[in-house]
Amino acid sequence: MNFFALFGFEEAFDIDLSRLSNTYKSLAQVTHPDKFSQASDSEKLMAVQKSAQVNDGYQVLKHPLSRAEHLLSIRGIQLSHETKTLQDPAFLMQQMEWREQLEDVEHAADQEAALETLDKELQQHSQAQYIELQSLLEVNSDESDIQAADQIRKLKFMEKLHHEIELKEDALFDE
Amino acid sequence: MALLQIAEPGQAAAPHERKLAIGIDLGTTNSLVASVRSGVAETLADSQGQHLLPSVVQYKNDGVVVGEQASLNANVDPSNTIVSVKRLLGKSLADVVQQYPNLPYEFDSQSSHVSMNVCDRKVNPVQVSADILGTLKRRAEATLGDDLTGAVITVPAYFDDAQRQSTKDAAQLAGLNVLRLLNEPTAAAIAYGLDSGQEGVIAIYDLGGGTFDISILRLSKGVFEVLATGGDTALGGDDFDHVLFDYICQQAGLAGDMSKGLRRRLLDDAKAAKEILSHESGVDIRFEDDSGVEHEVVINCHKFESLILPLVKKTLRSCKRAIKDAKVSAEEVLQVVMVGGSTRVPLVRHQVGELFGKTPLTSIDPDKVVAIGAAIQADILAGNKPDNEMLLLDVLPLSLGLETMGGLTEKVIPRNTTIPVAKAQEFTTFKDGQTAMMVHVLQGERELVQDCRSLAKFDLTGIPPMTAGAAHIRVTFQVDADGLLSVTAMEKSTGVQAQIQVKPSYGLDESEIADMLTSSMQHAKEDMQARMLKEQQVEVARVAESLQSALAKDGKALLSEEEYAAIEQAMNNMLEIAKAEDIEPIKAAIEKVDSISRAFAARRMDKSINQALSGQSVSEL
């Protein structure tokens, strides 16, 4: 399923998010099963399937990382379910450093501040990565796409780490 | 006497301009039915003028009593009178026994499902709920004077798949066509019209007789997103009665032992005092104790409030927790909707208002607000407001996942995903020649399988034998607009559709429902055949009506002449067959119409999508 086509967008990383949200609203209106409550069972089933695609497509296109991944999959590079690991020694080092930093938070005098510092650093890094990802995807060659895939793998790791930081912040609040 | 409408011979009566649809609030303590009449949504009363139907069912050897009378009999016949059945719906026997160890029912220990021995038979929570729904259905038919197109039934936002499925099964058993299961807080928000125009965060504070629920919703572009839910399943207005009862006993110097009759009487006095103290400054309670001594206890408003304050504060703590879970602040909450009879107590309104910094919405009767919202939605879904642009998008309340190695859960669809949703997961075989595998579906947020609800175990069979890891089985989980799950599976390389054996962990499978339907028919001395025939004929009418309007609108543009003629012929054939009284041929004819018009339906869907994309108005007229 090509979600760009479903939403009437060109296949590109840079998309107009407010147009996306408006298009989603219109598509949800015409595909939602509630609009078929008096129709036959097979039409209802079709509506469930179609509106599930619309909902899924909206989520995929809304978030930059899943949008990039979807774009690559249309270009023939599948990242989901892969077992391949990243071969970038510098990033692996950085990854380990961040992990250690996160573990050290427990011993910090001000845990909240320590988490915030780490999260900020992470955000700055990921912003830089997104800019690079965007220019790689714009090139649209086999070589740049392979590099873009690596970029996505890095960003996925960073997103996961960001999520772990959030969980720790939540845990601090609960104490 | 009502005048009968008689159609001229050979001419069918004109279809009703307006379809009758109802909203049902199937509550733990009380249930209600509402409908939109002359543009106004209102709850329907029974012949005695009562709107609330106590959710109590008493089974007798010669019949079933539902509501007020059953409630009065609960004390004398506790083991045959099922109270608050909603708490048992969609649960395993082990869950029930652990959560409610003191229930007076005789459970069938041979069954893993909850089944209770009452008088001469066994009943399960689905059947008990169906008896309540059936009573409301008959009330609605008597009041509205015609057959119902369908019903919207409300469920708590936190209900899992098994509880939702059980609610839907109960409705089916009661002979209701379920247009939609709707979350209770969403229904309350609709009743206040918060779906139109408003954007932002709203809170629904629901304090019923025995339960407390708080829901934080976000409304944006017609999407109702449940941000957080919380509450206490063992806290409600009944607890207010109990603290008053304790106070009365203490003031009168009554310790421990008292007759059942006096206890009952004082509890009733306490309840009455609570209601009086909600609008008056004091109440005077006089009674004679078991030894004939007269007592008088005076309670003023201030005393009442100080007695219940700890309970109210407890609900506020749940509110704060939910606000935090929703990642919003109390100030961000635009509106607070009050639901449940206990929100009439001024202290409750005052305290809730203070927490959120705004006056809560109370203009609609808090007992009726959920049923009214459900009726408004039912009216729309029945097709009475074709120009209505409102669309409710609910979210999945709890994550759906699968059991993986080591008793861990892997999330397939996270909570708060907008529904309908479909997600596929791929599996492979781990042995050469393996032709079957078991998939365990779970619902919940925790990591360990044992901490989540087990929804179903699927046996995937018919996998073509291959070497280990060569077969790729794609399992698709689909959740519909009611939050109900269905599963399909396919082996990718061969395209072989693997069969799925669904074993609901706590719900009932199709054959059990069919059995229950049969036995309920026998019991009610209704004619099973007659009901099934009627259902099929209603279905024929529905299919024909929707197809006719589709043909009139898009038939010429989207179909070739031959296609048009083929569909029309199948439809006329179906209408002809439906006049006879044979169920199977009618079913086959409906199926025929369905399959022949499938491509037409798909083209219509594509057309409306294209229109939506090109920004044209969909409601062309």
Image: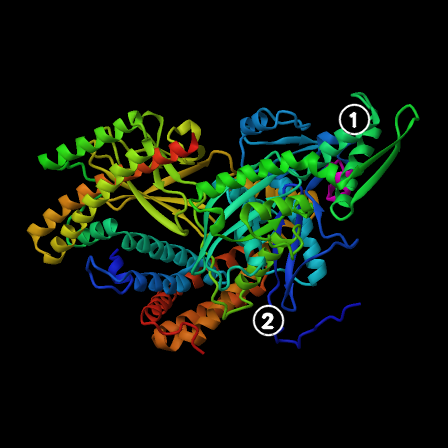
Quarter where residue B464 is shown: top left
Left or right? Give the position of A122 relative to B589: left
Left or right? Give the position of B151 relative to B227: right
Q: Quadrant of the N terminus of chain B?
A: bottom right
Residue B369 placement (x, y as % from top left): 62, 54
What residue is rendered at 42% in x and 27% in y?
Answer: B450
Magenta region: B59-72
What residue is rendered at 68% in x and 58% in y?
Answer: B141
| Residue B250, disc | 1
Residue holding disc 2: B15
Q: Earlier in the sequence, mark 2 or mark 1?
A: 2
Query: At label 1, which amino acid type do we have?
Result: Gln
The answer to whether A53 is drawn above or below residue B330 in the figure is below
Residue B476 placement (x, y as % from top left): 34, 45
Q: Nearer the viewer, residue A163 or B443?
A: A163
Q: Which chain carries label 1?
A: B
What residue is rendered at 23% in x and 49% in y?
Answer: A65
Residue B5 belongs to magenta span: no
